[in-house]
Image (cartoon, helix red, strand yellow):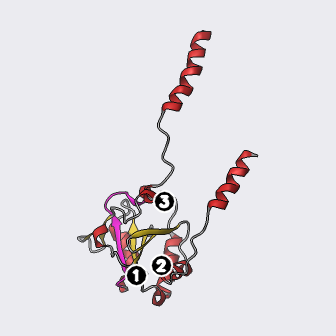
Amino acid sequence: MKYKLLIILLVFPLIAHLQPSKDKDAPYFKHQSYPDIKLILTDSTTIFNKENLPKDKTVALIFFSPDCEHCQHTAQEIVQKMDSLQNIVMVWNGPSYIPLTDTKTFYEKYELNKYPNIIMGKEVAYFMPIFYRIEITPYAAIYKNGSFYTELRNSITVKDLIAISNNTYQIPDYSSDLKKNKKGKNK
């Protein structure tokens, strides 16, 4: 009995050590260009993918849910300040499990359909939440000239979008927060 326990105690740590470690970086850190998005637009026939994204502009890939109150508020704010946001192409992407009719209703209700720089659709497959590790909506991945620039996680403010458009946005430095969290865990 003691030998079985000894073998178990020796084998389990060895197995755990040999397991491949989990990749802690989300895929968008590794692939700085546009992801392989595939949306069906609100006309229910047009497929929109990364080849449709401009390479020479600022693009916000916005993941949202039509029933999310923060998303609704963000849409209202964007429409109110659209004069300052003409330089950003905004691709609003609803989740694949939400009916396209809900996405279209959102698009029309908040009058996002009046602006040529706003594209609205829903995912064909559940891609963005995995690719960007999205935990809450709304979420925006910002690309400049086809390359990843920053993300707006947990909230999207018009103030931030305007600053990004004007090239005055200061990308937050989260490294000090990470150091604080590590110190707190060691206590």
| Outermost residue to the left | 45
Where is residue 127 shown, x and y percent of the image? 38, 58
Q: Which residue is mark 3?
A: 134
At numbered mark 3, what does the secondary structure look like: helix, strand or loop? loop
At numbered mark 2, what does the secondary structure look like: helix, strand or loop? helix
What is the distance, in whole Å, between disc 3 and disc 1 at their CAs? 23 Å
Location of the N terminus by quadrant is: top right
Local crowd at mark 1 within 10 Å, few (<14), some, or many (≥20)? Answer: many
Q: Is the residue 119 above or below the residue 130 in the image?
A: below
User: 87 or 94, which is in the foreground?
Assistant: 87
- Whether residue 20 is in magenta: the answer is no
Where is residue 169 shown, x and y percent of the image? 55, 77
User: Looking at the image, is mark 3 or mark 1 nearer the viewer?
Assistant: 3
| Outermost residue to the right | 187
Circle 2: residue type: Ala
Q: Which residue is mark 2?
A: 75
Tag 3–tag 1 contact (CB < 8 Å): no
- Whether residue 123 is in magenta: the answer is yes
Residue 86: quarter of image: bottom left
Q: Which residues are magenta?
A: 116-128
Tag 2–tag 3 contact (CB < 8 Å): no
* Label ID, residue 112: 1
Circle 1: residue type: Leu
Where is residue 14 shown, x and y percent of the image? 53, 26
What is the distance, in whole Å, between disc 2 and disc 1 at their CAs? 7 Å
Q: Is the residue 185 above or below the residue 115 in the image?
A: above
The residue shown at (36%, 86%) is 114
Earlier-in-chain disc, 3 versus 1: 1
Tag 2–tag 1 contact (CB < 8 Å): yes
Residue 5: quarter of image: top right
Earlier-in-chain disc, 2 versus 1: 2
